[in-house]
Image (spheres, helix red, strand yellow):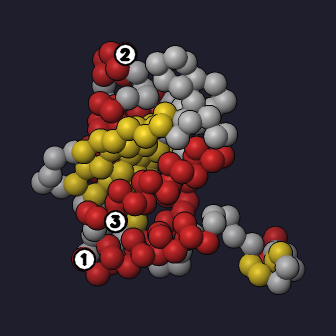
Amino acid sequence: MGAKGRTIAGSRLMIFPPALIEAARALLVECRARGIMVATAESCTGGLIGGLLTEIPGSSDIFDRGFITYSNDSKTALLDVSAELISTYGAVSAPVACAMAEGALGHSKADIAVAVTGVSGPGGSENKPEGLVYFALAHLGGVTQSEEKQFGAIGRAEVRLETVRHAIAMLMPTA
């Protein structure tokens, strides 16, 4: 078979773990039932949250758009995160995550937006170690909420997957 239809042991090649696909599918069903549009603002995941949502056929009716804002300049240019906020708190911080989520709402047709910024690794610092991720959830007419998670030095790929998993879980109760 061609690259699009590659199989492994007779099953279709999947980018994400099946449990993560099912969580995203459940989120999409819930959002669809309530007429809720979603947007993402991603730094450390580089678009994996949006990638997961769009892995599911028919997601375009609830997933409006995703912003991959890996650099500080892109956070400012695309999401209106102030350079002063980044300078004061650092790109990996709760205030920046909140500003990212609010910027995603402001630059989309979404009702809810999730944002992530963190240190996937390898490396980090004493104050911002590998595995530290800040999440924010913004919704129209509501107060933006943030969370800090310390996944630890579990490896870059695992930090990113855990971040995607937690972002999907954060979106679900608001749907």
Question: Which of the two labelled residues, at mark 2 and mark 1, occupies the earlier sequence position?
Answer: 1
Q: Is residue 120 above or below residue 4?
A: above
Indicate the secondary structure of the residue bearing disc 2. helix
Q: Is residue 72 above or below residue 35?
A: above
Question: Which of the two labelled residues, at mark 2 and mark 3, occupies the earlier sequence position?
Answer: 2
In this view, the mark in front (3 or 1) = 3
Crowding at label 3, few (<14), some or many (≥20) Cα neighbours within 10 Å? Answer: some
Q: Nearer the viewer, residue 5 or 49?
A: 49
Type of residue at label 1? Arg
Query: Do the residues under discs 2 and 1 have CB atoms within 8 angstroms?
Result: no
Indicate the secondary structure of the residue bearing disc 1. helix
Q: Tell me the residue that label 1 is attached to.
A: 34
Q: Tell me the residue that label 3 is attached to.
A: 172
Relative horizontal placement of residue 108, taking residue 24 as reference (left or right): left
Can you see residue 53?
Answer: yes
Q: Position of residue 132 (x, y in %)?
A: 49, 33
Q: Tell me the residue that label 2 is attached to.
A: 87
Q: Residue at x 47, y 79 (%)?
A: 58
Query: Do the residues under discs 3 and 1 have CB atoms within 8 angstroms?
Result: no
Relative horizontal placement of residue 57, taking residue 95 as reference (left or right): right
